[in-house]
Every structure is written in structure tokens, then in C-alpha cells.
Image (cartoon, rainbow, N blue to C red):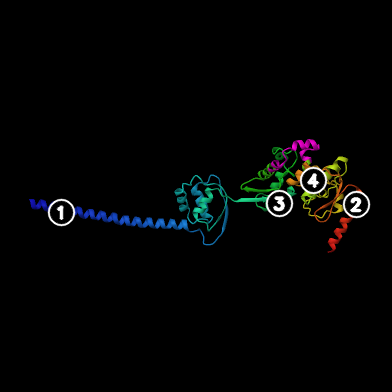
Amino acid sequence: MWVVVSDTVGGGMSFGKKLLRSVSGFFLVFSCLGAIVATVVFFQFWLFLSLPAKPFPEKKRFFIPQRTGAYGIARLLQSKGVIRDASEFYLLCLLKHSNDRLEAGEYAFSTLERPEEILSKIVGGKVVIYVVTLPEGSTLAEVAGIVARAHLAGFSEIIEAGRSARLAKALHIKAQDLEGYLFPDTYRFKKPVSGARIVGRMVARFWQELPADRQNREKELGMTLSQILTLASMIEKEAKVDPERAIIAGVFYNRLKIGMPLQSDPTAVYDLPGFSGPITSADLKRPSPYNTYRIKGLPPGPICNPGKKSILAAFYPAKVPYLYFVSNNDGTHHFSVTCREHEEAVSHYYELKDKAEKK
């Protein structure tokens, strides 16, 4: 009996050991396989993080729409060839806790950028910046061309916004359009942006650049802001060197006081589409509401967008006795008090011009 029991117990213990060994072996093999799989997955993810999408540089520019989720962005990036795998990029977002921090907008990516660099750019909202520089003396049409060439907005969209009396009123401009109020400067924009928003930024800068005592100066000069700005636009077109701006302003004010025509050449061609010069005697005779050879006083509005120096010259003209000025053919002008002196200066100008053309 004892032997039988002993054998039975002994046999049961032997079977249990075998079963335990089998289970242990299974778990060992499973653990090894799991470790191998984990290593492969980790290595694959490491390669994803370390390698760019393509072995050669290529710029990709596109919009990430508003309210696009992390996985939607990942799929968009993969479809554009910026990353190799959307699922792995989404995993990267999870690991970086970036799901709710991805910014919409227009981005420019290089296919050589690593996924972490791409994610950092989107989280930081480092979208494409459009830089637009307006030179002093640009007209509305020229501003529209500059904006259009920068691929920021269409030419017609800027023209429409610039000619909108309703928008001018909303921007506190007492005029029918925004010619003269688009302050020449360098601007930075992000897309999407409307034409109204673009010109609105330029007008906002205009208000910032006006002199602090402008209202007192308007009263002292007996001029409205629109009239002063119109004069500033003429100064901008006439002056080539800064020291002469206030002098030219003084000449124009002197003419206005005695009712003398302003006779500013640039006013005669302002409303000629695409005019590129030179201004001829026929241009000076053409009928136009802006042609100060044919009308008395100021034109109905600015003929360009003047810079700060010309605006200040119009607000603070030099006290000079001059009524005339003519080019010296070198960027400067000869200023005269009498008509006779002016005629002599004009003759001298044509002599210089003839010599320059013969060279």
C-alpha cells in the first residue's frame, strides 16, 4: 500500500514538474518572441524618427486646415510625401503630448526634415510668412502688383479693397478710396488673409506714422488731412533728395496762397493706366481732374502713397520765398523766386539734358 501510494504520489509530482517546465518554456519562448518583436518595432520607429521621408531635398508647401486632428494631419503629411508613415507620426504625437497643440496654416516642409522637426514646426505654428515691401511713392495699382507678385492676394482683390469707399469709412478715412493711405513699409503676413485685411494693416500703419500734433497743424495750415496728404503725395513724386522735400512743400504752399496753378508734372499722368514716362508736353495738356496744369488748386486726392518724410514735409513746409523749381538733371532742383529766373533755369536744364543725351 505504501509502495503504491508512494509510486502514485511520486508519479504525480513528476508530471507536475514536467507541466511546470513546459509552461515555463512556453513563457520563455513567448517572452523571447515578444522581445524580438518589440526590438523590431522599436528599431523601425527609431528609423522613422531618424531618417527623412526622401533622400533628396524637395520643398512641399500646403495648408493644414482648421480643426484637423492629429491623425488627419499625419495622413496629410504622408500623402504629400513629407513623412513615410502616418501611424508612426501619430504615435510620435502621442508620445510628445502634442495632439491638441497642432496649429493650422500654410507650411513649407523639406523632405529632408526629420519627423520630430516637422512636428516641432507644426506645434510652434511656424507657418509660411509672406514679406511685402512697398516703396515710397507707390500707387494703389503698384501696391496691388507687388502683393500679387508675392502670391499673397490677387491684383484685382487689392484694387477692389483699395477703391472701396465702405472700407475707407470703416478705417476712419474721409475719402472715397485708400490711395495715399497705404503706408510704404515692409509688412509680414500669414495666409489665409483677405485683400481688405492687407490694406487695413497698411492704413493702420499710416495712422501710427502721423505727427502727434497733426490736428493742430491742420488748423494752422487751414487744410484737411486729405488735402495735406494729397500735397505729400505730390512732394513724394517731385523730390529726389530728402533736404528738398520741405522746400518743395513750401513752394506748393506759396502757390496755393496766391492762386497760382501748382503745375506738378506727375499729376498730369496719374490717371494714365500703366504710364512709365517720360512725361511729354502733350501729357501736360491732356484734360484730367488730376492735371494741375489744367486745374486750380489741389487734385481731388493723392497721386501715390507718400512716405513719412514727405508727409512730414507737407505738415511742416519750409518758409521759403520760392515759387518755382526745375530739375538740375542730377536729382536736385533749382529754386527760383521770379518767373524770369525760372525761365533761365529751365533753359539751363535743357542744355544739361541735351549734353547728357549726346554722350
Q: Residues within 10 Å of mark 3 (few under 14, many from 20)?
A: some
Question: Is tag 1's residue or tag 3's residue first in the polypeptide sequence?
Answer: 1
Which amino acid is tagged 2?
A: Glu
Question: Is tag 4's residue or tag 2's residue first in the polypeptide sequence?
Answer: 4
Residue range (magenta): 205-227
Asked whether, in this view, residue 313 is left or right of residue 36, the answer is right
Disc 3 from disc 2: Cα separation = 39 Å
Residue most extreme to the bottom: 359
In the image, what residue occupies the spot 89% across and 55% down?
A: 347
Which amino acid is tagged 4?
A: Ala
- Nearest the viewer among 122 and 81 is 122
- Quadrant housing the C terminus: bottom right
To which residue does mark 2 refer? Answer: 343
Which amino acid is tagged 3?
A: Gly
Which amino acid is tagged 1?
A: Gly
Question: Is tag 3's residue or tag 4's residue first in the polypeptide sequence?
Answer: 3
